[in-house]
Amino acid sequence: MEHRLKKYLRTETLPTPFCPGCGHEILMHAILRAIDELKIDPREMLFVSGIGCAGWIPSPHFKADTLHVTHGRPIAFATGAKLFNPRLKVMVISGDGDLGSIGGNHLIHAARRNIDMVVICANNEIYGMTGGQVSCTTELGVFTSTTLEGNKEPPLDLCRLVEAAGASYVARYSVMHTGPLITSIKKALEHKGFSFIDVISPCPTQYGRRNEFPTAAAQLQALKTRCIPIEKAKKLPQEALEGKIIIGEFVSKGQRDEETDKDSGAGGTRGGAQCPAPGAGSGN
Amino acid sequence: MERIKNILPPGEYFFEGNEACAEGALAAGCRFFAGYPISPSSEIMERLARRLPDVGGVFIQMEDEIASIGAVIGAAWAGAKAMTATSGPGLTLMLENIGYAIMTETPCVIVDVQRAGPSTGQATRPYQGDLMQVRWGSSGDYQIIALSPWSVQEMYEMMVEAFNLAEDYRVPVFIMSDAAIAHLRETCTVSEELSISHRVKSHGTPHFGTEDQLGVPPMASFGEGEELLITGSTHDELGYRRTQDPTVQKRLVSRLSEKILRNARDIIQTEGYFLEDAEVALVAYGICARAALEATKRAHQAGLKVGLLRLKTLWPFPEEEIKGLKVQKIFVPEMNLGQMVREAERVAEVEVVSVNRVDGEVITPGEILEAITT
């Protein structure tokens, strides 16, 4: 029997280029499971990704419109596409370096505008593709190819960042929490507004081998103790949360006006109640 | 090409260059603008912020120039005729994504209202410093199209041409304006009808290659069920990454250039004044060409055989037109330290002399005349 998610893949591109033990393939599976369970026609979706390993999750694998862009800019490209054709269901999938460092400005402003899109950060806490350099989400003390004595810069909590900026759905899970992760992606897809999910996805090749994880499995297993659900974390003293990753839903606001829904006012302005059909924007 | 009714009632308008730019874009079918404020271009975005909603278009002010051109490219693939407007420093920020637009063959229009640089320079003073930035600023090998208007009327008309060329060749097209043209107010005659190019669509065929190895492929939009696979990495005709295949890289980079170069004769537009019996030719573009024309007329009155070749197209460079000048000497007045003059020297068969003004003021006919006569 054919795998139920195979229909969403450009099978000629398989196997994926991800290293053995990489979390990105688990995340890829979770995203497709969410789409499948919601019965979304992938032809209505646009997947936008930037540079880095995570950018390869949708491109070239997903059998849908995929736009693989420059480093850090997928949210900007996605904003233009979504504003011109609000019928597109837009999902951005990229890494922590792409979304949090080089593209941090776009992340903040898309959250502020509450643009209707789902942004999934495949957060491996390192620059994987370029050889394991420190990233904005690398924990203190971690060894990378550019922090030979351990990382001295505190990491950025991307969930708190987008929450402060105005995102209306914010969650974090790891690839070891696939059940709640799939549920969260489904919620994000159904949420009207800017949704952000930070997904901790280990990189055994560049991170694990430099940081005392003898195997990919050990690194995956460690996520079970590193991650603490937010409900539990609330009851624990601050010291008990040292070095822990808090997972769960941080923001889940009700419907509110979002940028692509407006028909008047400043920025992101579209005239008329009807959106032109794609490609019909000329000459009338 | 299709003849369509103009969206503005025909007649005479009193526009500044930046307003004519915005109105020309709307006439051409532009329905998406993303930009970031920068002098001396901001009136373009301000007018489009007001006018785009009137015609069912989308306006957004982005967080920076990088995001602006990114949004333009995203909207173009969603089906829009899309543009941005900026000045030299903003253009510098856009260059990486302009390279992406070139690589992915995304039609779009970028208006560069040039000001004196480098860096922040003189934010409100005219200059012609970005000729090479638009041509070579992004990484790798490519060809783009750049046009430069010398009047408010031409700014209006050139915007329509720019959008048409962007669709015809699936390439970013630059409008090289400057602070003087941008804020000049003149009469602009709006015609009842105009000709526009529609996006060539084809379903189920490759979007990055044609049977003709050097052709312009058709282009679908998101949401049409085409399962578009778009990447700035080296890709085959279906969009699949082929980053280790020398044949694919060579074929792609050759086609990106040749689809423009082999149509250069159709793209390039110039105008000649008094060139028939000229012994000396001026070669100029933009606001500088207005001073050059006046210098040419004054030279005639003084009995000197001087002509003017005015470049409306800057890239691809009008090599044949300059090479074909039957004169003894060519003068190239420009408001920079000598950028176009090097291109002219490369192709001309006679002596080429540079005439410059670099203080943020518009070059005068007197200065050009003086250079010719001394």
Image: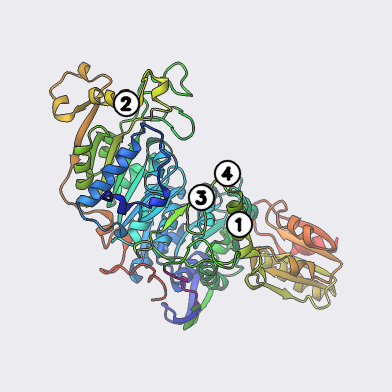
Where residue A95 sits: x, y (%)? Answer: 38, 38
Dot 2, how many residues are within 10 Å of its Cα: few (below 14), some (14-19), or many (20+)?
some
Amino acid type shown at disc 3: Met
Which label lies toward us, 1 or 2? Answer: 2
Label 4 residue SS: loop
- Regarding mark 3 in the picture, which secondary structure is present there? helix
Label total for image: 4
- Picture coordinates of residue A226, whole percent (x, y): 25, 23
Q: For mark 1, does the 10 Å Cα neighbourhood hold few (<14), some (14 to 19), or many (20 or more) residues?
A: some
Asked if residue B63 shows in the view, the reply is no
Which residue in the structure is indicated by mark 1? B251
The C terminus of chain B: image quadrant: bottom right
Q: Nearer the viewer, mark 2 or mark 4?
A: 2
Chain letter of mark 3 equals: B
Where in the figure is residue B13, as x and y percent of width and height? 48, 76
Helix, strand or loop status at disc 1: helix
Q: Residue B84 in magenta?
A: no
Q: Are marks 4 and 3 on the same chain?
A: yes
Label whose residue precedes the other's in the sequence (4 or 3): 3
Label at residue A217: 2
Q: Quick one: label 4, few (<14), some, or many (20+) residues within 10 Å?
A: few
Q: Which residue is mark 4?
A: B119
| Residue placed furthest toward the front | A1
Chain identifier of the residue bearing label 4 in the image: B
What amino acid is labelled 4 in the image? Ser
Q: CA distance from mark 2 to mark 4?
A: 51 Å
